Amino acid sequence: MNKKFYFILVTAALIGSSAFFLFPDITLFSDKLNLAVCFLIFTTQIAALIFFLTSLRAFKKDLRRSYRILATGILLFSFIAMQLPIVNIFPDIDKIRLSWAIAASAILSALVMYVAVRSFARLLGVRNKYTSAWLIAFAIVITGLTTSILPHAELPVAEISIDSIFSSFAVAGVIIAFCGVIVLDIRRKLSRYYRTAMTWLSVALFMASLGCIHEVITKLLPFFNQDRFSNYFFYGISLWPYLATGLLFLKASLDFRQTSVTASELPENANPIDVINYVAGLISNPTAVDNTLDKVRQITAIRGPHSKLSPADESSLRGVYLELEKYLTTKEPLRSFSKDDIRGR
């Protein structure tokens, strides 16, 4: 992990620690700690969406749109962590309505993230059962109905509110899990240049999914509403999935930012095969130029990657380079390249 990640983490921790001073009416250490963790979660997720949004200049408009939608989903998801601070800032607020609002934010964030990753998948021609609107609709109905009939602890809330609020969280968890699977499929299709960012994004989505399911399991089921689990909630421990989600989104955003900057330049002694491998690595979908690269594989199979090339080999490699350059400047689905961009590397 780079220094920027740790700097942001320390900054977020300092912002989180402000909870110990901003609310003088709160005297219990456990309450202050819960607030601090909530602020930390919110700060890391806001930092992540900022890094996503400020890393889009090098990419094409369709990908920029997908990531802007994803950032909107992250923003909506971050509101989940703000329920406790809102209660403390506005003590007279209707807590049931607030719970409804937070649940709505959870399911809306999931749907927005789904739209984002599905549109990203379509850019690369990634289609599987998880991108099917029919399957997501079926999953929403089944998850909602299943959650509504689960046995639950006695809560001072109307039954319909309990069912609706926790069903929303369960549905959000399932939808976000679908998002994680789709991102994994996207990752498989992308070149190694993009894979690290996609790996962290998929892990972040799976953790966000776990956070929603964890919310249902620990707050709805009677088993966890026992005195022996009280410390798990009093000291902010139960917020760990959301904190982990914020940190993972932050890591994913920083790695995505790295893909948006210019890659390291080729060494001066690079041979034609090195140049072609480098340029091929800039292509987001390697399978699109696989047939073109067969010519390079034939040459390296006969002569080896560092052997002296014949004039015919050099001419063939020159043709390969020009084909790759043409693909990057005219067909590359994710990034915008010009000939000067490529040749200047």
Image (cartoon, grey):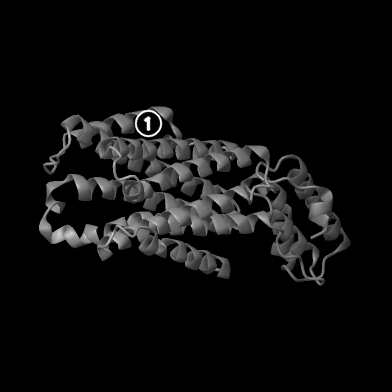
Location of residue 332 (image quadrant): top right
Front residue of this view, candidates 337 and 221? 221
Left or right: where does residue 96 sit relative to residue 255? Answer: left
Identify which residue is drawn at 38% across, 32% down. 136
Front residue of this view, candidates 230 and 151? 230
Query: Mark 1: which amino acid?
Result: Leu
Identify which residue is drawn at 78% across, 47% down. 323
Q: How many marks?
A: 1
Residue furthest front in the image: 25
- Residue 203 visible in this rendered orientation of the protein: no
Crowd rating for badge 1 (residues with CA inside 10 Å; few <14, some 14–19, many 20+): few
- Quarter of the image with the C terminus is bottom right
Identify which residue is drawn at 70% across, 52% down. 293
Left or right: where does residue 168 sit relative to residue 191? Answer: left
Location of residue 277 (image quadrant): bottom right
Q: Position of residue 185 (x, y in %)?
A: 49, 46
Q: Position of residue 99 (x, y in %)?
A: 29, 39
Identify which residue is drawn at 62% across, 47% down. 285
Left or right: where does residue 138 sit relative to residue 294? Answer: left
Location of residue 263 (image quadrant): bottom right
Residue furthest right in the image: 311
- Residue 269 visible in this rendered orientation of the protein: yes
Quick one: SS at disc 1? helix
- The residue beneath circle 1 is 135
Q: Position of residue 240 (x, y in %)?
A: 33, 59
